[in-house]
Amino acid sequence: MIDDTDPVLMRPDRLIAGGEALARDADGRVVFVRGGVPGDELTVTTIEEKGDWSRVLIKQIVTPSPDRVEPPCPRRRQGCGGCDWQHIAVAAQLPSKVEIVRDALRRTAKLPDAELRAGRSVPDLGYRTTVRVVGDADRRAAFRLDRSHETAPASDCMVAHPALLPVLDSIRLTPGLEITLRTSAATGEITARWDHASGDVTGLPEMVAIGTAAQLHENVAGHRFRVSAASFFQSGPAAAELLVDAVKRAAPELGRARTVLDAYAGVGLFALATTSPKSKLVTVETSKSAVADCRANLAGRNARIERGDFGGWRPDRGFAIDVAIADPSRAGLGRYGVGAMVSAEPPVLVLVSCDPVALAGDAALLTRHGYRHDGTEVLDVFPHTHHAECVTRFVHI
């Protein structure tokens, strides 16, 4: 750590991708302020320094921003790394995420006039139906501290679904062992998954289904979904509902589309919940578990379900797609995903992105292939964190 002998006054002016605040020093160099809020007046300590930028920690909050609040969760006040924006007022979080997305599209995608709109947020309490915890030195369920291997107890987590709280209190696990717990808001089912070769877990209620093959069922937009413990699902059904609604509004063509491609399809959330029962569906997903769930969830639909890396996927000769949906991982489509997508030549593409910089990179690649950015809606499905979910419409020109 670089230790400053004299206090340095900083005034962050905006938040950036990754969650830090940005300020400028006396020489005009960029300074990343960990834990800062635009409008703060702070004294800081430099912990990292490069040629044209530095990173600082807050030494003292001289004058707090109007958007600064005391973190409401005692675990965050202990240093829990799970909710890195609890010091920002809930009402300011979604607008801040919109501006972060706007900046990414301007800088990386060269879209200074991109159409952006703020969507909705999930409730900021008890919204996470999936949590991952680690065993602490006393074998209790815990969360890791921010940028540390140290831990804070997971009990009373304010964003975990209430059905998970008794389980977090009751389980005991090998120190250092990670376990993923998931519950269904619709049925109350709970699954638990961990690496049995790395340790043991005791204290799980009898009704908890254990292992990668364990399943639960969740309701979203009037549909029931099977979700295996090893399959990806959104932060909760409220998040899934917001995303389904946003995807349908981004592509009203889905209501009459003859053929829909769902790339990175997961358990088939968008394939089932956003399309007409008359549509032919093509889904591509790499996870064995998610593909099996997708087959179960799309039973009775005209669907071709393919397992494989979408970056290597190509359509059959003469294959025509009316609308494509893609929900890739945090890294985005990237060069190979964009290559696969443009090979199918969908006239309309809806891209679901969970990282603003990845979205901007994908937008730049798609622009080079003849796709026009036609509006992004920013949603908050992870309140109290810097993570922003975006649903973007692209049209081929």
Image: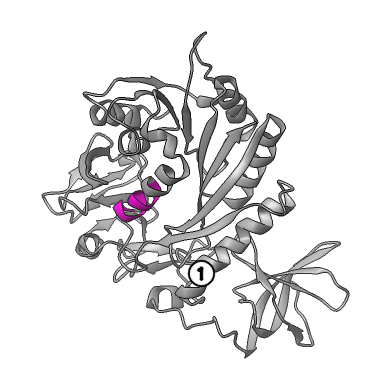
Q: Position of residue 279 (x, y in %)?
A: 34, 25
Is 199 placed above or below 286 here? below
Figure disc tally: 1
Horizontal side of 275 relative to 172 (left or right) equals right
Residue 227 % position (x, y)? 27, 39
Q: Can you name the residue that lies furthest to the bottom here?
A: 62
- Using the image, determine if residue 240 lies above or below residue 67: above
Q: Nearer the viewer, residue 301 or 72?
A: 301
On the question of residue 104 being in view, the answer is yes
Task: Inspect this view and state whether residue 136 appears.
Answer: no
* Bounds of the magenta segment: 236-243
Q: Which residue sits at x=60%, y=84%?
A: 65
Vertical comparison of 306 with 180: above or below? above
Pick the quarter of the image with the C terminus: top right
Residue at point 29% right, 44% down?
A: 193
In the shown orientation, is residue 112 left or right of residue 263? Answer: right
Image check: 222 left or right of 345?
A: left
Where is residue 96, by image quadrant? bottom right
Name the residue type under label 1: Gln
Kindly identify which residue carries mark 1.
Answer: 93
Secondary structure beneath label 1: helix
Q: Position of residue 327 (x, y in %)?
A: 47, 39
